[in-house]
Image (cartoon, coloured by chain):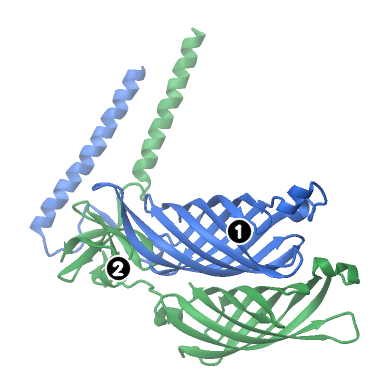
Chain colours: A green, B blue
Amino acid sequence: MLLRSIQKYFNFVKSGLGIWLTLLFITNPALADEIVQVQITQPYIELHSGPAGGFPVIHVAAKKEWITVLKRRTNWFKVETNKGVQGWVKQEALHLTQSSTGEAVKLADGSFESFAQRDFEFGALGGSFEGVPSMTVFADWVATANLIAGISVTQALGNLSENQFFLVRVQHTAFPEWRLSPYVTLGAGKIRTKPRANLVQSGDETRTSDLLAAGLGLRYYIAQNFMLKLEYQHLQALTDRDENEDLEQWKLGFAVFF
Amino acid sequence: MEIGIRSFFLGLVCTLLSFSLFAQLSEQESEQETEQSVIQPSVERRDINEANIDSENFEFGMLVGVISIEDFSSSMVLGVRAAYHINEDFFVEATYGQAEAGETSFEVLSGGAPFLTEAERDYRYYNVSLGYNLNGETFFSDRWVFNSATYITLGAGSTEFGGDERFTLSLGAGYRLLLTDFFALHINMKDHLFNSELIGEEKTTHNIEYGLGATFFF
């Protein structure tokens, strides 16, 4: 009897769960029937077998056809026609469609126009720090068209010592609308210098100092979310010794923006 | 009781499916009737914008392989790999890997006097590379076709080995097989070049790594 009532209770819970799940399925718009669709306004657009221009065209979708946009990779979009054919269209082709509200589709494409509206930059630079090879990675926030704030981490590995430093920086551009644009940068941070393991016996030891930096640079917008940076930095390490240490760094690298 | 509930749900699912089927049919009908109308009543379309399209430009995964550490025999290497695809041709890749170096032939033959301590034998590297894709397709059979890419990378980073960190250049080549749109298998080879004076005079060492990887796009 007890067993039976437990089973009854169990079934009740199960059915409750089932109904709840069913309701969830019906009410959740993402699972149900809300889809991103666009309608082709030009004579046709081509569907490729993969997300690059070199992949062959496997299907052609005609004017007035609705296509569902499934996902994006770089500037390619995976779409499905209403006949169920899946393929990749490039962004220029997607811009030959209109949205459900009848407006022409226009998405950020990494053009120079969208470069002006970027929020973040990430990049890596390689160069020379006091004559030894250096590597820098940075993340910047584009506060205004002219002003950028960010952080950079550099590692310079020489024959005598290993240097690591980080800087919190601001960067100012007077001509943000130029493709090739000069900028100035100021920063402050810390530097850690560790002598090579085979030199430790000579009495040197790891030291950390405050660091100030001023620099001049050029950035060049290439294409598609991509830019080049060339920068010269003069650094001053505020050491415990009588004299501060003046340091120089040259670097060249690339950045992507979002 | 069980069967009752099951048939209830089966009925429910059938009803729902028939609704959607009916909706599709009526949609097609209305499409024929009013070809002029842009917005069709039964499908709720969201407006297209950057936020509601799933963008898969990042790739993240693990790698496992063998690295030949110059003068210190070969060891297994384990690592992680992250990449950002800038466009169809170029990507930026960051890798971190670690291995434990073996013994030099001198250490093995002399049977004593180790060059490095256990901690100094840990080999760790990171690098940031720019990669270029040679996109293509791989045909395993007539019907079994996958998108793939052969890629080359050029990068720089650092290697920590023998108590020191060394500036390291890395040259690589690899092959990415996309089993689905978001899951890929990699075969890759990378040469890590750095200067070392662990064995006497300073020289440029070539540390060649080859391995397998699996990555997800998200």
**Alpha carbons under labels 1 and 2: distance apart:** 31 Å
Residue type of the residue flagged with mark 1: Tyr
Q: Which amino acid does label 2 sit on?
A: Gly
Chain ID, mark 2: A
Contact check, label 1 and label 2, Cβ < 8 Å: no
Bin the neighbour count of mark 2 within 10 Å (Cα to Cα): few under 14, some 14-19, many 20 and up: some
The numbered disc on residue B196 is: none
Position of residue A68 measured from the top left corner of the image (x, y, whole percent): 27, 57
In percent of the image, x 54 and y 61: which residue is there?
B190
Q: Name the residue under label 1.
A: B96
Residue A53 numbered tag: 2
Q: What x and y, as percent, mark residue B134?
A: 38, 65
SS at mark 2 in the image: loop
Image quadrant occupied by the C terminus of chain B: bottom left
Judge by depth and name the residue closer to the eye, B135 or A22: B135
Quarter of the figure with the N terminus of chain B: top left
Pick the front one: A89 or B215: B215
Vertical comparison of A244 with A30: above or below: below
Q: Which one is in front, B114 or A115?
A: B114
Quadrant of the rendered structure where residue A165 is? bottom right
Task: Tell me what residue is drawn at x 34 percent, y 23 percent.
Answer: B5
Q: In this view, does B34 lie to the left or right of B12?
A: left
Q: In which quarter of the image is residue A67?
A: bottom left
